[in-house]
Amino acid sequence: MPIPSGVAAPPPVQIPGVGFATATFFEADGTAWPLTTESAGWFTLSEGVSGLDAAPYELTKDDHPRGGSRLRYVQPLERAIIWPLYVYGDSHMEFLARWRALTAAFTRTLRLGAGWLEIGRPDGSRRRIAVTYQDGFEGQGKQGTGITSDSAVLTLYCEDPYWIDPVPVRARREFSEGVDFLDPYPSVSSSQVLGATTLVNPGDVEAWPVWTFTGPASLVTVTHTGTGESFSLDPGAVGHGDLLAGEKATVTTDPPRVRYQDGANWVGALSWPAATLWPLRPGVNAVTFQLDGAENGSAVDLSYNARYETA
């Protein structure tokens, strides 16, 4: 049955097409269902797992007058994961209880929101993807099945085709008083202060950060130096006035959302229509933070989950 809170994850097993790993399905409320632990009363079948590698893409192309074509646009498509499970019990009623419980857990994603399929590696790293049940819990319908055992071949729909690291990457930049380079002796500023800096995205594709700005600040501008994309947050535009010391505003880039610390909707504080809530590209990103009216305590915090092509 589900994994109780605080119980260690099972050791890795061989999953076809994946290698040594553990697989767990998490419902939207966090309830965990192990998929590679035979003692649970079900386990992943040795063949048939698919859909865990590179995301599918659709290429939009234009014919070229001298022959061939030119790529105009690349669109990542949704992903379908095939996951076969074998369910068994010592008696018909034990098998039936397990079958019903698993069916209910996966189909609840259709009513309560997507769950997560998570792959864990022997080094402790994990990647997960949001999944919604599509079909497959019908059983084999063969003679002898459905009594004390049966198998299901699940199709899991993934609206976002990319895997994420469930452990978020966090960074913080703070206000720092300027210092004279030669007084009283040669000195340099920390890279962790506001201004020009770099942020590193370890993933394979763009990551969409959540920004939290802490006052004092009268205007916040965040610019991706490499692309020129930027957005500004003006608290005065929503009638609040300057962010005072300790006050916080949070900008979510995907989906676009702006909230003051009490939950008030501050989307009108963004510099529309010029604002671009830009992503972090894979690798090194040159970024500039500008906080007008910054003083001691002013800070920018960001958090994001790195995204990957494969499990």
Image (cartoon, rainbow, N blue to C red):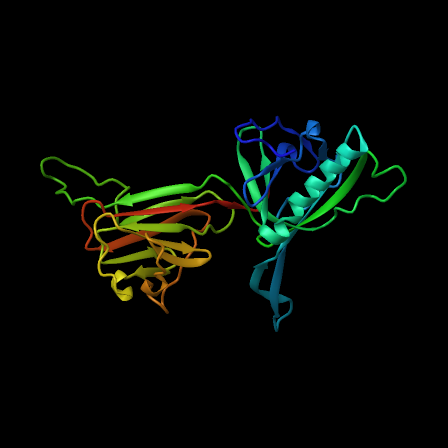
Q: Is residue 297 left or right of residue 65?
A: left
Looking at this view, name the residue that lies furthest to the front: 93
Percent x, y of residue 85 = 73, 38
* Residue 230 vertical placement versus 98 (above, below): below
Q: Residue at x 61, y 62 (%)?
A: 59
Numbered disc total: 0
**Would you say 59 lies left or right of 277 here?**
right
Q: Residue furthest left?
A: 184
For this orientation, the residue located farthest to the bottom is: 65
Residue 84 screen position, x and y as percent: 73, 41
- On the question of residue 296 being in view, the answer is yes
Which of the two residues, 144 or 311, is positioned nearer the viewer here? 144
Q: What x and y, as percent, mark residue 152?
A: 76, 42
Residue drawn at 72 percent across, 31 percent down: 41
| Residue 158 in view in this figure | no
Q: Nearer the viewer, residue 211 or 145?
A: 145
Residue lying at 25% horizontally and 61% vertically, measured from the top left: 240
